[in-house]
Each structure stands twice: as structure tokens, then as C-alpha cells.
Amino acid sequence: MTEERGGIVSYPLVRFHIVFSMLYLGIVLLGGLLYSLQFIGLYPFPGIEIFSPGRIRMLHTNGAVYGFIINGFMAGLYWAVPRLTGHRVWNERFIGWFLAIALQAAVLATAGGLLLGLAQAIEWGETPVFIDPAVVAWLFVALAQFAVPIYRYAREKALYASNWYILAGLIWVIMVYIMGNYVPQFFVPGVAGAAVTGTWIHDAVGLYVTPIGWGLMYYFVPVLLRKPIWSHALSLLGFWGLAFFYPLQGVHHYLWSPIPMYAQYAAVLSTVILELAVVTVIVNFLMTLRGNAEALKHNIPVRWLFVGIINYAVTCLQCALQVLLTTQKVIHFTDWVVGHAHLIMYGTFGFWIMGFFAYLWPKVRRSEVYSRTLDEWAFWLITIGMSVMWVDLVSAGLVQGFTWWGLSPFIDSVNFSVPFWVTRTISGLMITAGFVAFAYNMYMTGRRAPVPAAQPQTSGGAV
């Protein structure tokens, strides 16, 4: 398959989404740092309603998903789907740029609505009501954009696992977005609405972020390691496990609530069972790496992907433990949950996107990486910062939970938490410094002269 500008991949669209994904990641990290400062008495905007910590937090979380992750996935999809199918996406010139510009408009409109206090009272569904119809329309068009080449390929040959995951994720997200943003808002109030909201909270991750992330990994891991995936059967076992058990999990966000206990038990059971599907994915990637461990030393994109896989294994084991009713008695409403969310959304899917970018950016710019040293600094600052943040928040959660269980005065748990909150801010500064190194390296790489008549080099030397 040709990689020239007139070939089956639109380099300008890939570049566009990479740039905006990185831009939003910078804003998201700034929002996270600002939010953390309120816990140590250093918040710089006290009493300013539009920049109140609660609104900054929603900007942080929504920007991470809709700005950073979706733009990152769009870049990966525009690169991977044509190569997986041998066909161009449905329409690049009009539909591609319409989707690209409309996504940024929706993200900015959402950010403005959140800062102005127009959020919906739905966790992960805070997008203002007037944004939701546009988002649903965007999702339908995005489905068509990538479903067309997959359908054309399916008429000729059997689909590879990546196509299964990508197509399913693009379909599922439409259903769960409508369910999560309309049903509890307009049709099902009270406890029943909370159950639906819980399903949306988890399915936004499980039925969009997870299948798209897995699908892109099933493309990039074999490409970077230059060898086939270890087991196609395991890849499909993971797919059906995801399809059958993930939709049932959402209620585990509301354990020990008035929601009927049979629904809570079902959520706990399905969460634990799903870990078997997760194991198939982790084993598949690790076994594909077998015999190529040297790549972790020299290939920065491979390193991002496989550290993300390790983080994924850790966070999924944590998930299986924290959904147990006994565990929930301790860790519910504590910083343990915050640490878990950061490790899955950034430590896993964020690391995978960083790996995609480290591989793709030199290619779409047709230039050599500016600095291997900056690549190393970015990787280690972000990896160490993310690890420290996770350990710190999980530890803080245990301290908070057992303090509450012991019926100590609430202020005791606050006082005990201050050292952990200081550490969280320090780890956030490490992550931000790593991001600056990564972004500056990308900027300088983009400024270098194109490599003539040859494949551009990635930081790891993969093609």
C-alpha cells in the first residue's frame, strides 16, 4: 500500500488530529494541576465562579475523553483502517474535514458550556444538553466514514480482529451515548436513572475507548514488532467477552445504593468475569513481544505501548478487587477511585496514544525524530509521574477509607490526606514536564526538512 500523499491514507487528517489531541492534552494537564492545588490551599482562582474547582474538574475529565482521546483515536483510525482494508475511508475531502472541524467545535462548545455552569448532572455526561444532538450526528457520520472501507473489505476477505473491534466500538458508542445523555435526563429519574447513568459511565470507557484502543493496538503492535499477532483466536475471544460482559457492569459505581441488589450482584459478577477477556488481550500482546524484548530498549513507540499494557493489567486487577462489596465499604468515595481512573485513562489508553504518535508523527511529517534524548526524558518523566500518582492516590484512598470506617472525625481524614495531595501535585508536575518534552520534540521534528525518497525514521527505527 502506497504511503504517498495521493495514496489511500490522508496524511493531512492524521496530522490535524495528532496536533489537536496534543493541544487538548496540554490543556487537560493544566486543568488537572489547577484542580489538585485546591487540596493544598494553593488554588489561584478562589471565589471566581467560572474558574471554580468543580468546573475545572469537568473541563479536565471531558477534555481528556472528547479532546485528547477521541482526536488521538481519529488519527490512529485514519492511518490504520485504510491499511487494514486496502480501501480509502468513505470521503476525506468533505466528510473527513467536516468531522475534524466539527469535533473541535463540539469540544470547545462543551468547554464553554461547562465553565458557564451549563453542565448536565450526569457523570461523564456533563456535556450541555444543546451539544448532545450534534454529538450524536457526529457519531453517525464517523461510523459511516470508517464502516465503508471495512464493509468493502469484508466483501472480499475475512476481517482481522482490529476491524471487529473498531466497527463495534463505532456502533456501540452511538447507543450508549444516547442512552446515557438522554434517558436519565428526560425519561428515567431517581434510582432507575442512576442505574442507567452508571451504565453510561462505564460503557463510555468499555464500549468505545476500550474496543477502539484494542483495535488500534491489534494493528500497531504487529506493525511495530514486524511479526503477526500471537493468536487470532484469543483476539476474538477477547472481543466476545467484551461484548457480552462489559454492558452489565455500570451499576458497580453505585454499590450499597438503593438500586436493587440483584443488579448490583450482576454488575460485580460481570466485572470479575470480564477480567478473563482482558487476560486474553494482555497475554496476546505479551506473547507477540516474546523474542523481541530488545525492542523495549531501542524502540520508544513499542515502549509506550507495552508499559501501557502493564498498566492495563494492574488497573484491571485493581478493578476486579475494588468492585467487591466488602472492598467498597472501604474505598468508595476515596482517592483510590481517582487513582484507578487515572491509571486506566492515561496510564493505559493515554500511553497507547503517545506510542501511536511517537510512531506516526515522523512518518506524516516525513522527517527524522529531532531528539532521542527528549524522547527518553518524556517517557521516563511521564511513566514515573504516573506510577507515583497511582500509588499515592491508592494509598490515600486506603487511609481515608479506614479513617471513616473507624468513625474518626472527618477532619482527621483531611489532615491525613494532605501529604498525599502534595505528592499528587508533584507527580502531576512530572507528567506535565514529560508532556512538554514530548510536545517540543514533536514540534522540532515537524520543522526538520523532509527525508527525500526514503521512509522517515521513528524514534525506535520501526517502519
Image (tube, rainbow, N blue to C red):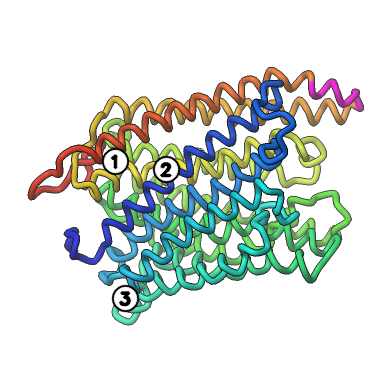
Name the residue located 55 percent from the left edge and 28 percent from the top edge: 428
Instruction: Say which residue label 2 marks.
Output: 22
The tag on residue 153 is 3
Q: Is mark 2 in CB contact (under 8 Å) with mark 1?
A: no
Among the 4 quarters of the image, the one containing residue 299: top left
* Residue depicted at x 15% and y 48%: 455
Q: Nearer the viewer, mark 1 or mark 3?
A: 3
Type of the residue with mark 1 = Gly
| Quadrant position of residue 149 | bottom left
| Alpha carbon separation for disc pair 2 and 3 | 32 Å
User: What quarter of the picture does the N terminus occupy?
Assistant: bottom left
Work out how far the residue at label 1 is from the one at label 3, CA to CA, in angstroms. Answer: 32 Å
- Relative horizontal placement of residue 198, taking residue 455 as reference (left or right): right
Disc 3 marks a residue whose amino acid type is Tyr
First to last magenta residue range: 407-414
Earlier-in-chain disc, 2 versus 3: 2
How far across and down, in percent of the image, does residue 220 sit? 33, 52
Q: Amino acid at mark 2?
A: Met
Residue 39 magenta? no
Q: Residues within 10 Å of mark 3 (few under 14, many from 20)?
A: some
Residue sitting nearer the eye, 385 or 42: 42
Q: Which mark is residue 365?
A: none
Quadrant of residue 361 within the rendered picture: top left
Number of numbered discs present? 3
Of the two numbered discs 2 and 1 in the rendering, the one whose residue sits closer to the viewer: 2
Q: Nearer the viewer, residue 193 or 5?
A: 5
Q: Is residue 404 above or below residue 98?
A: above
Q: Could you say where residue 245 lies in the image, as x and y percent from the top left?
A: 63, 62
Image location of residue 184, percent across then percent down = 76, 64
Q: Kindly identify which residue carries mark 1.
A: 291
State whether residue 173 appears in this view.
Answer: no
Mark 1, other Cα within 10 Å: few <14 / some 14–19 / many ≥20: few
